[in-house]
Each structure stands twice: as structure tokens, then as C-alpha cells.
Image: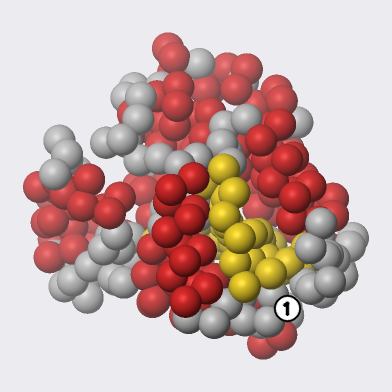
Amino acid sequence: MKDVMILTGAGQIGMAIARRMGYGKKVVIGDKNLDNSKAVAKIMNDAGFDAVPLEMDLSERGSILNLISEAQKYGEISMLVNSAGVSPSQAPIDAILKVDLYGTAVLLEEVGKVIREGGAGVTISSQSSYRMPALSPEADEQLASTPAEELLALELLQSKNIRDALHAYQMAKRCNVKRVMAEAVKWGQRGARINSISPGIIVTPLAVDEFNGPRGGFYKTMFAKSPAGRPGTADEVANVAELLMNPQGAFITGADFLIDGGATASYYYGPLKQLQ
């Protein structure tokens, strides 16, 4: 039996983190598209890791529970890397809320029930939530603490209150950050930690979809006018995940880390401000 890492979302960011932290572990890779899971598992196995692919739909509680159950067959779950999700250019409002908001809440909740002592997790949020005005304390608490099965019934998430797919995405990612804070309290009772990372423009297939989508010009301008002047790489996100999941990050839990090359800073206090 081995320690087990669960990786959800067979994409570049998740794989970069798994390659950084998955050595010596069984890496169970879940993705809605089994071919994606198989592709990442092959790359990792060819590099000396021990990975197994599974089909997993983050929008379905039963599918999440099945992934956890399958992972437990190999040993105790010691790490979670959640990089699954859909973007505003890929999915309609309902799907974004069901996958990015509800599904992430279920995953954090259920893994938190079984994560072993000393375990750690990261979930990938987004810089996008930082460009949305602050919510009320009551709304933040609802997103953080409402039972997962009741989340989508919240008034602030009803269609009349969601402007478009981008707004849905921002709400989902704000929920991710608040959810991590609340779940960190529960994970802590098991001696485990959970944090979130909010990347900016990272060069992945998802980002390419965004570049070619209706807001592509905005995203290209965003990184061009950020202090870094470029998009980021998946390995740069993995650099931060490595700190958060290693013993060096033992005092860090319930936190979110913005990794966007300064794009948010430019959005509020620099040349990107004029694009609001």
C-alpha cells in the first residue's frame, strides 16, 4: 500500500503539480474525458511515476465518491490536487456553477473526511475572482459554509443574479476561496491542510480557448500590460503548490495565493484600469 495522491483535471497545471509532488505515491488521475486521464497517466508513468487513470465527472457527487473509493484501494489519501474545471469560453452558466462551484465544494468536503494526518491539498481557483467587487459578509459566509447540496439553491446564484458566464465563473472561484477557508478548519481536525491557488494567464489548452474566445483580446492585453509582461507557465504554479504541500508550508492553511504576474495589480492600479 502507498500514500495516494488524487489529481482531478488531467491538464497542464494539475500534471505539473503532480510531477512535482507525486513521486513515491500512487497518483489517481480523474478527468471527465478518460482519454485525457490516460494521456497524463502515460506521460507520468513513462517518467517513472505510478499513475492510474479514471473517469470522473466533477459535477456529480456519485462520480466524486467513486474516485475517492477507488483511490482508497491503493492506500491512504495523503494529497489532493484539484485542477478540474471549465472556463467561461467553454461552458454555459449552469455548467460552470455545477462543475467549478458545486463540484469543488463536494470534492473538498469528501476528501476532507478521509485525508490522512499530515496530508495536504491544493485547489486551483482563478485571478478572475479578484476582479469581482467584494461580496457582503453574509454572502461570503453562505459560499463558505452552506452544505454542498444546498449551494446551487442560494439566492445569489440564481439566474436573475448572474449576468453572464464570466460572472458565474467569478462567483464560482470566489466560492472556491471561501470554501477552502471553511474546509481548512475541518481538515485541521484531521491534522491536514488545504489551500487554494489563483493563477492568472497560464499557457495551457484552456488558456488557448480563452485567447480564441470572445474575450481573447482582453486576456492578451492583460498579460501584455501586467508587470511581468507575459503569461505564466504551469511549472510556476507548481512552484507555489510545492511549498504549500511540503513540510515547509506546515503553517499555511485556509489561504489563497494569487499568481498572475501582477495583472490584478495592474487592473486596479495600473494601465489595465482603463479597460474596466
Rendered-image quadrant of the N terminus: bottom right
Q: Position of residue 10 (x, y in %)?
A: 46, 55
Instruction: Classify residue 257 as left or right of residue 206.
Output: right
Of residue 32 and residue 255, the one placed in the foreground of this image is 32
Q: Is residue 168 above or below residue 221?
A: above
| Image position, residue 58 (x, y; %) | 57, 38
Foreground residue among 37 and 145 = 37
**Residue 37 in sight:** yes
Q: Which residue: 53% across, 28% down?
A: 98
Q: Quadrant of residue 163?
A: top left
Which quadrant is the C terminus positioned in? top left
- Residue 133 on image: x %, y %: 40, 41
Tell me: residue 136, above or below residue 109: above
Residue at the location (53% across, 22% down)? 156
Q: Secondary structure at mark 1?
A: loop
Residue tagged 1: 251
User: The residue under label 1 is which amino acid type?
Assistant: Phe
Whether residue 186 is visible, yes or no, is no
Residue for point 43% across, 70% down: 43
230 versus 275 height, above or below:
below
- Graded by Cα atoms within 10 Å as few (under 14), some (14 to 19) or many (20 or more), the crowding at tag 1 reads few
Residue at (13% x, 56% y) in the render: 220
